[in-house]
Structure formats: structure tokens, C-alpha cells
Image (cartoon, rainbow, N blue to C red):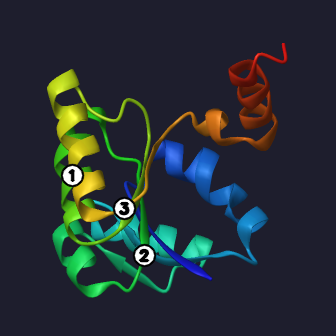
Amino acid sequence: MHRLALIGCGDVAQRDYLPELYRLGDRVELAAVCSRTEERASAVAQRFGARAWYTDYGTMLRECDADLVANLTPIQSHTEITLAALRAGKHVYSEKPVASTVQDALQIQEEARRQGQVLVCAPCVLLFPQVRYARALLEAGAI
């Protein structure tokens, strides 16, 4: 069972991600959520069944036993938070864009490689089995 920590409990998290997390119920446990305000963090944790909640992502990364992080923060925070999560030994799924600049994106990519962590950025459709199959067919020259 993978343990997920979610950073950023705003509209995208509450409308798009957390209500659908049950679909991964046998594979993913919501270990923690983090938001800038105590009220939002505690309310989201209670509503979606997170074991813990935080208002500081650095503290969460140090204390939480999550092995993967979903970064759903505002775009200007993506680089800082994704790098911190990777350096804390967490796999990262980031909402788009992964960074505000190409230089930052390359830095994140290199840090993931250095740490041996998986980094995925929305939209993740390129990971869907049917898309990977079509890509393999194209690369093999079958179509």
C-alpha cells in the first residue's frame, strides 16, 4: 500500500483529486494533507480521511511516513515544493506545469534522477496503458 501526502488543499484537490481517490483505495492510503491554513487542512483531512494534517510542508515531509507526494499548490510554488519532496525521498506527482521555467523543470528532473525517485506531471495520460501501447507500436514501425 502506497502512502500519499497531498500538498495544496484548494479547489483542484477538493474537486478533482480527493473525491476520486477511493478508486485507488486498495493501493493508496491518504497519509496526510497540507494546506496554508489550519482550518482548511483539518477540514480536508476529516472529510477525506487523511491520517494527519499539516500547515507546513517542510514539517510534513520530515514527519509523515508517506512515500509519495501530490503537489497541487499554485504554480509559483511547484519548483520549491517538488524539490523539497524529492530531497525528502518521496516520489512526486505534480500538477501542471511542473515548473515555471525550463531551467527549473530541468533542475527538478535532475533531482528526481539523482534521488532515484519517480516524477510525474499532469496530465499523466502518457502513462495510460493504451497510450503506452500505441507509442510502442509507433516506435516499432507497426503503424
Residue 54 vs residue 42: left or right? Answer: left
**Which residue bears the numbered disc 2?**
67
Q: Position of residue 32 (x, y in %)?
A: 43, 76
**Which residue bears the numbered disc 1?**
111
**Tag 1: amino acid:** Glu
**Which residue bears the numbered disc 3?**
117
Would you call the spot at circle 2 few (<14 residues within 10 Å), some (14-19), or many (20 or more)?
some
**The one of 24 and 112 positioned closer to us in this rendering:** 112
Residue 35 vs residue 106: left or right? Answer: right
Residue 140 vs residue 4: left or right? Answer: right
Q: Position of residue 34 (x, y in %)?
A: 34, 66
Would you call the spot at circle 3 few (<14 residues within 10 Å), some (14-19), or many (20 or more)?
some
**Tag 2: amino acid:** Asp
Q: Nearer the viewer, mark 3 or mark 2?
A: 3
**The one of 32 and 82 positioned closer to us in this rendering:** 82
- Residue at 21% x, 52% y: name it: 111
- Residue at 63% x, 33% y: name it: 126
Q: Position of residue 79 (x, y in %)?
A: 21, 42
